[in-house]
Image (tube, helix red, strand yellow):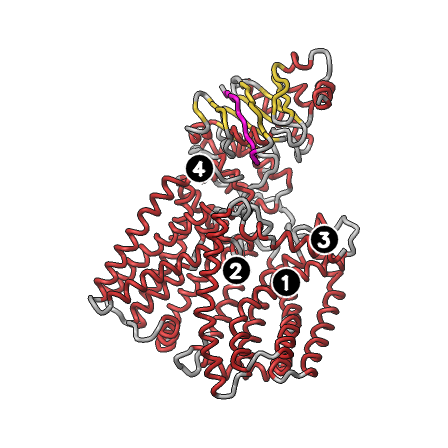
């Protein structure tokens, strides 16, 4: 039964049709385009993150310190596990949506729990394996590919996250229990997750000793952690020294701990699922207030409500602007460090204004609500389709929401960076002009993406926010527009002044955005009509 | 008023979900639409509401085509689906306000209509609560209220009585009759044949996408029960 149920749950969560949002056999052109986008995404990922670790591996190899690469691998694998479990465990284990379907079936609750945990772990393994693959490759490339080392790496990779999974599952449950009766439960979860994400990012970029590769600054830090947490060392020694004792220690302790976890939480899982996520409905005698609004305002308000009521949506689509705000505030106090991080991210030798612009553009391109918000209408799509609202109005409301989300913060950030770094008022105005136009371009592009690759048939919103073709194309499309602007700057930087280049970039972005906006205006209706609701 | 002319729709290009369907619904008609599961009832209702495209034929409401003038048609109709999937991130009142904004209903009218129907269906005191905390029946009531507040000329309902408690079902039937007496047309699908028999002045039976019988309820039934007629038609090959 365990195998059958797990297979079913995996199919329900990860089938290609579910991931893409359409049937590949029926839409081959769309499939090919998505395939190309995936290749591009992998190319960008391995070309940046991969190259940094390959370079670090070379540096550590020269110093005879390759083992530290494994500290990086361990840290990122555990950090990613923490994030995924914190975000998903309550929904996967303690308050799962299909409880009403599964509980009346003659399946032992432990089997259901084990299947649910397996699906959660598979999601975690796949994500962290892809993310840490460049580090593992770099390590084995510089130390040599040996069968036992790779075997211990694979076995250790399965067992290493299990203890963090246990701890974070309980934390996830505690957060869910503490917040579920509050009307601000989603907002509290969003704040907690933003804080956790920023803490991990700040930790990753904590630069002790600035060098050409930002990762070198973290060497001491990671080697310090590995000494403080024994399973870190077991995993590292098992691979580096092919130590059978260490791999056995890791497998036995983590395996037993996880086995006990499953056995011991059975009753708890039953109880939490029986209580359910639905809070008790209370009669509210507060008088109902009525206020009429223009349709556009009403649609944008709806988008806001949706955004702040979906933790996964808010955290993923809002992380860019939150990061931007945090960095711009931090720049008031840590100017030199921020400058270092920016120059390492983008490339040294560039003016600080252009580094700031690159950072802001990056954060804006991570704010992709128009690329997914139509999909997020999901089962509610019938509402907007049956109402007398033009499809273009709906799409422009989604674009406007995205602009409200990112433009004010981008402008505030420019002012704050302006104060801390001290660039001129004229340059600040130019940067503001650029980010407004760039945000319009990105938002409009994202809207077109979602019109072409909507995904209404999903079980949970994560499928749309993190795994859909719309999200992928939105993010990497944004990066492409950054690259276009970067190329323009690179070609012109020796030829003319900063101000002229920015003005030209603004003009180019307007030229790119206008036909896109026209496209949304004229084609939305047709594309809406062909969407299944 | 509502003219469905030779409408055909296929989802896969092979099987016809609606096969050359033609019906006319006059002002004040209370029109029951029955058929077995998968017969094409929802497809036709969604096509009229402009939710899905149909392959051929024409649907006209007061002379406006749902294909050519969808906004004009949608201004005149309200659609209630078989499953009340609505924005769970909103509160009940926020949802009703959203619908009222879309139909540009002034504050006086929305206050009056929402108070009237929310009191009638006994959900006034939970309108400030999030929809996510509502039961299926409460969501159904909310969708019904959202359909009534803008005073549509045509009400399209897909299985409207599913999930409603007996009192709400009774009230809804009263609302139907009251609306029809004021010239509103109501076209609804249902499996509750008794309701059609007692309530509707017209009925249509759909089988495998084709309308196999339609007309005045009393003419269709003649001296039999609607259940017998339906079973006879269903068993014909």
Q: Secondary structure at mark 2?
A: helix
Quadrant in which the N terminus of chain A appears: bottom right
Q: Secondary structure at mark 1?
A: helix
Q: Position of residue A13 (x, y in %)?
A: 62, 54
Asked if both marks, 4 and 2, belong to the same chain, the answer given is no
Residue wearing tag 4: B101
- Quarter occupied by residue B204: top right
Up/down of A92 relative to B169, above or below:
below
Task: Specify the subunit that label 4 lies on.
Answer: B
The tag earlier along the polypeptide, 3 or 2, is: 2
Q: CA distance from mark 4 to mark 1?
A: 45 Å
Task: Specify the subunit that label 2 lies on.
Answer: A
Q: CA distance from mark 4 to mark 2?
A: 29 Å
Asked if both marks, 4 and 3, belong to the same chain, the answer given is no
Q: CA distance from mark 4 to mark 3?
A: 39 Å
Q: Give, as a single range, the part of the protein colored magenta.
A: B2-13
Q: CA distance from mark 1 to mark 3?
A: 26 Å
Main SS class of the magenta portion in the image: strand
Q: Position of residue A416 (x, y in %)?
A: 33, 67
Task: Specify the subunit that label 3 lies on.
Answer: A
Counting other residues with Cα less than 10 Å from the Cα at mark 2, is it few (<14), some (14-19), or many (20 or more)? many
């Amino acid at each position: 039964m365990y195998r059958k149920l797990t297979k079913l749950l995996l199919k329900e969560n990860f089938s290609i049709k579910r991931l893409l949002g359409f049937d590949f056999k029926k839409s081959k052109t769309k499939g090919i385009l998505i395939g190309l986008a995936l290749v591009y995404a992998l190319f960008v990922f391995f070309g940046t993150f991969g190259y940094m670790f390959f370079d670090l591996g070379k540096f550590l190899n020269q110093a005879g310190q390759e083992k530290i690469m494994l500290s990086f691998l361990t840290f990122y694998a555990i950090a990613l596990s923490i994030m995924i479990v914190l975000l998903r465990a309550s929904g996967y284990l303690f308050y799962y949506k299909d409880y009403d379907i599964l509980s009346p079936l003659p399946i032992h609750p432990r089997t259901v729990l084990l299947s649910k945990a397996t699906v959660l772990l598979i999601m975690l393994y796949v994500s962290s394996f892809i993310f840490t693959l460049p580090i593992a490759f770099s390590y084995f490339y510089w130390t040599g590919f040996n069968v036992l080392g790779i075997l211990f790496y694979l076995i250790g990779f399965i067992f290493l996250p299990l203890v963090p999974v246990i701890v974070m599952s309980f934390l996830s449950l505690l957060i869910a229990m503490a917040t579920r009766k509050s009307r601000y439960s989603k907002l509290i979860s969003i704040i907690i997750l933003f804080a956790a994400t920023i803490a991990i990012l700040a930790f990753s970029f904590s630069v002790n000793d600035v060098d050409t590769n930002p990762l070198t600054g973290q060497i001491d830090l990671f080697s310090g952690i590995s000494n403080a947490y024994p399973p870190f060392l077991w995993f590292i020694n098992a691979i580096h020294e092919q130590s059978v004792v260490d791999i056995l220690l890791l497998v036995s302790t983590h395996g037993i701990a996880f086995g006990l976890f499953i056995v011991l939480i059975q009753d708890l899982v039953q109880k939490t699922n029986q209580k359910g996520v639905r809070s008790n409905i209370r009669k509210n005698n507060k008088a109902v207030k009525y206020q009429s609004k223009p349709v556009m305002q009403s649609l944008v308000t709806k988008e806001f409500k949706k955004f702040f009521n979906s933790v996964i949506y808010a955290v993923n689509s809002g992380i860019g602007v939150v990061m931007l705000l945090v960095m711009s505030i931090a720049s008031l106090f840590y100017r030199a460090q921020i400058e270092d991080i920016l120059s390492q991210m983008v490339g040294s030798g560039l003016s600080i204004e252009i580094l700031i612009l690159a950072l802001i553009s990056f954060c804006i391109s991570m704010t992709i609500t128009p690329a997914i918000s139509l999909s997020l209408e999901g089962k509610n799509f019938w509402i907007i389709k049956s109402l007398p609202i033009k499809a273009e109005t709906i799409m422009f409301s989604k674009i406007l929401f995205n602009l409200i989300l990112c433009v004010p913060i981008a402008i505030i950030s420019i002012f704050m960076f302006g104060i801390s770094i001290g660039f001129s008022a004229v340059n600040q105005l130019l940067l503001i002009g650029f980010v407004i136009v760039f945000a319009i371009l990105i938002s409009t592009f994202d809207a077109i993406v979602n019109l072409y690759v909507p995904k209404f048939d999903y079980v949970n919103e994560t499928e749309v926010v993190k795994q859909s073709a719309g999200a992928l194309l939105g993010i990497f499309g944004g990066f492409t527009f950054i690259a276009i602007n970067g190329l323009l700057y690179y070609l012109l930087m020796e030829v003319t002044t900063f101000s002229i280049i920015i003005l030209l970039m603004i003009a180019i972005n307007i030229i790119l955005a206008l036909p896109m906006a026209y496209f949304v205006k004229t084609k939305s209706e047709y594309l809406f009509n062909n969407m299944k609701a | 008023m509502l003219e469905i002319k030779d409408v055909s729709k296929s989802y896969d290009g092979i099987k016809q979900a609606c096969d050359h369907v033609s019906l006319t619904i006059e002002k004040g008609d209370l029109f029951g639409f029955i058929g077995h599961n998968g017969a094409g009832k929802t497809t036709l209702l969604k096509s009229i509401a402009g939710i899905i495209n149909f392959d051929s034929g024409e649907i006209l409401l007061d002379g406006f085509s749902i294909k050519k003038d969808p906004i004009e048609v949608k201004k005149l109709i309200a659609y209630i689906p078989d499953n009340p999937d609505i924005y769970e991130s909103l509160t009940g009142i926020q949802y009703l306000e959203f619908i009222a904004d879309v139909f540009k209903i002034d504050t006086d009218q929305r206050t009056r209509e929402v108070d009237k129907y929310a009191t009638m269906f006994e959900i006034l005191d939970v309108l400030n609560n999030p929809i996510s905390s509502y039961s299926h029946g409460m969501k159904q009531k909310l969708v019904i209220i959202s359909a009534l507040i803008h005073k549509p000329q045509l009400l399209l309902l897909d299985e409207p009585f599913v999930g409603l408690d007996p009192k709400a079902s009774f009230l809804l039937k009263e609302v139907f009759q009251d609306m029809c007496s004021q010239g509103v047309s109501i076209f609804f699908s249902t499996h509750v044949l008794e309701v059609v028999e007692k309530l509707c002045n017209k009925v249509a039976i759909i089988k495998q996408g084709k309308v196999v019988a339609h007309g005045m309820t009393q003419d269709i039934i003649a001296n039999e029960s609607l259940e017998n007629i339906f079973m006879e038609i269903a068993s014909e090959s």
